[in-house]
Image (tube, rainbow, N blue to C red):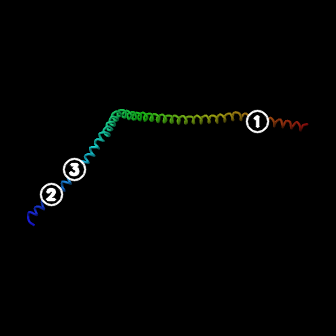
Amino acid sequence: MNETTIFTVFVAVTAVAVVIQMLILAGMYLAVRKVTERVMALESKLDEQVVPLVGTVRTFVDENMPKLKTAVDNVVEASSVIRAQADKIDATVTEITEIASTQAAHAGAVADRALRRVDSTADAVHHAVLTPVRRISALLEGVAAGIGEFAGRQRASR
């Protein structure tokens, strides 16, 4: 082959390569254009739907943040008050329990003293009543024996 033919083949191959490259670039351009159109459509949808929603949420948050802060502050304050009241109730219950325990011990001691006094009084009454009764009984037995003896002597003397 001569040089001209080789040169012509080389130019033809280069031309075909350039055309193929141009077709690839044209395909890439069309694909990028389609993607760009989709992104633009998505952007407009985003502008129409999401941006107003974000604005609404932001407004809602801005309007309700003070209320939420107040609610949280109220919960914290209520928790403190409840804790203080629970401490007071605990102290009161402890005090009442101690008083009740002391009173129960005192009542037990009073009951013990009263029972001892009742026992002592019962013994004293028992002793005070039975001693004279025994003495009178012994006296009556003696009188009865004396009368029995006297009556027995009178029968024997008849």
Q: Nearer the viewer, residue 85 or 65?
A: 65
Q: Quadrant of residue 141?
A: top right
Q: Residue 109: image x %, image y %?
A: 57, 36
Between the residue at mark 2 and the residue at mark 3, the CA separation in whole angstroms equals 21 Å
Residue type for callout 1? Ser
Extreme residue in the left direction: 3
Local SS, label 1: helix
Indicate which disc residue 29 carries. Answer: 3
Left or right, residue 65 beside residue 123: left
Residue type for callout 3? Tyr
Q: Residues within 10 Å of mark 1 (few under 14, many from 20)?
A: few
Image marks 2 and 3: residues in contact by CB distance under 8 Å:
no
Q: Which residue carries the number 2 mark?
A: 15
Q: Which residue carries the number 1 mark?
A: 137
Q: Residues within 10 Å of mark 3 (few under 14, many from 20)?
A: few
* Quarter in which the N terminus is drawn: bottom left
Extreme residue in the bottom direction: 1
Q: Mark 2 or 1 closer to N-term?
A: 2
Q: Residues within 10 Å of mark 2 (few under 14, many from 20)?
A: few
Q: Nearer the viewer, residue 109 or 93?
A: 93
Q: Mark 1 or 3 closer to N-term?
A: 3
Local SS, label 2: helix
Q: Nearer the viewer, residue 123 or 21?
A: 21
Left or right, residue 51 beside residue 153: left
Residue type for callout 2? Ala
Q: Residue 80: image x %, image y %?
A: 41, 34
Q: Quadrant of residue 158?
A: top right
Q: Nearer the viewer, residue 39 or 119?
A: 39
Between the residue at mark 1 and the residue at mark 3, the CA separation in whole angstroms equals 145 Å
